[in-house]
Amino acid sequence: MGNELSGAAPKTGASASRLAALNLLVFAPVGVQLPFQSLWYASIGFAAESIALVNGATPIARFVSNLLIPPLADKHGSTARLLGVCGFGMTVASLCAGLVQPAYALVFLCIVVSAFSQGPMIALTDSIVLREARRRAVAGERLLDYGVVRGAGSVSVLVLMAAGGWFVGLFPPGAMIYVIAGVMALASVGVVLLAPRDARMGGAGAVQMRETIARPRVVVLVVLAGALIQASHAVVYTFGSIAFRAQGHSDFVIGLLWAIGVATEIAFFLASNRFGGASRAYGLLIAGALFAILRWLLMAATTNTALVFVGQALHAFSFAATHLGSIFALTRLVGETRRAQAQGWISGANALTMAFVSVMSGHLWTAFGLSAYLFMAGVAALGLALAVAAALDPRRDD
């Protein structure tokens, strides 16, 4: 009881390298999903609106699962077990999507189930890392650099994006989903082996949660600001590869265009402490919004290959700075026993906002083509306004 009241965090016994490897595995499927899943949809005959619909439904599934599953981890201390169940679910559902192609309704159902299963995995992993970071800080041990550990996940995405164009090209277009399911299967096995068992936590977190409730305005502003900035990526996530291919780029170059964004993202994560780390949470969030606006304006204005690479490189800020700003700010605002749930709030809000903007992006892309990026700049501008409001709130650090 004394340890709980003192705020001591439970020991996970997880080394930095183990946590980095866990991140690497959890993010591995994203490295093939992001550049190639929409191409698979197109290869089996889905129209732009149909692609946008399924890409809009999957974030809703992630939103629901992020509301339901992370609280179970906080309540029962079952993060590792839940990660394994989620990994199994996403793998089986993606495999089934391949077996029922090209039937749109059945593919839609399988992909939604896969997204529901995959949705909480990042939030659960973040909660493990942040819990260990707090344990080390309380115990006076060598601090854990969240940016470096999280950067391992981006390394995994980068490698698979860079190699994916070549590897996917070895198979018929309809087989892309089996490649994705295979990566999911391998990653899920590794997650089960690496995820540390967590302990139940008690009173300290409950006290800190009352502090969170005392300033809900700041929490809401942070969560919504991050969600809007991340949702402004909807057009590039949904139609980026299709646009790159229409501009005459090979699958290899498409992979490189995605890889350059992830490479700069990794560099930003590794250097995050140089930008102030958690002490500059709100500044990171504002920077993410500003560079997102710049990125989408650039992508709307040009098809020049060099400038498109520059636009993709701005992912370091539009995504990574936004992600770190949201994580660091919310970590300062919530209690230990709600750590997984808080990460679920971020992931859930991101997913729901992305769902709406993704559906909208299908109509925008059909009507305006590359000019759809201008609307994404507007979405990021809304996020900027909320981020500034959070930064200026006098109670943000109470």
Image (cartoon, rainbow, N blue to C red):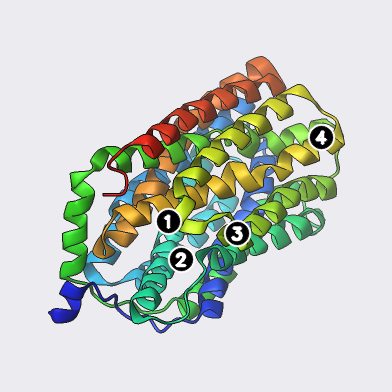
Q: Which residue is mark 2?
A: 88
Mark 1–mark 3 distance (CA, rounded to whole Å): 35 Å
Q: Which residue is mark 4?
A: 307
Q: Nearer the viewer, residue 373 or 359?
A: 373
Q: Is residue 143 visible?
A: yes
Q: Residue 284: horizontal and vertical position, in percent?
A: 52, 46
Question: From mark 1 to mark 2, how far is it between C-alphas?
Answer: 8 Å
C-alpha distance separating marks 2 and 3? 38 Å
Instruction: Answer with left or right where residue 68 lies relative to residue 50.
Output: left
10 Å crowding of disc 2: few (<14), some (14-19), many (20+): many
Residue under numbered circle 3: 274
Q: For the residue marked with disc 3, what is the amino acid? A: Arg
The amino acid type, in three-letter code, at marker 1 is: Ser
Q: In the rendered structure, which amino acid carries the disc numbered 2?
A: Phe
Residue 55 badge: none
Which amino acid type is shown beneath numbered disc 4? Leu
Label 3 CA crowd tier, 10 Å (few <14, some 14–19, many 20+): few
Outermost residue toward the front?
Answer: 394
Q: CA distance from mark 4 to mark 3?
A: 27 Å
Farthest residue to the top: give it: 367
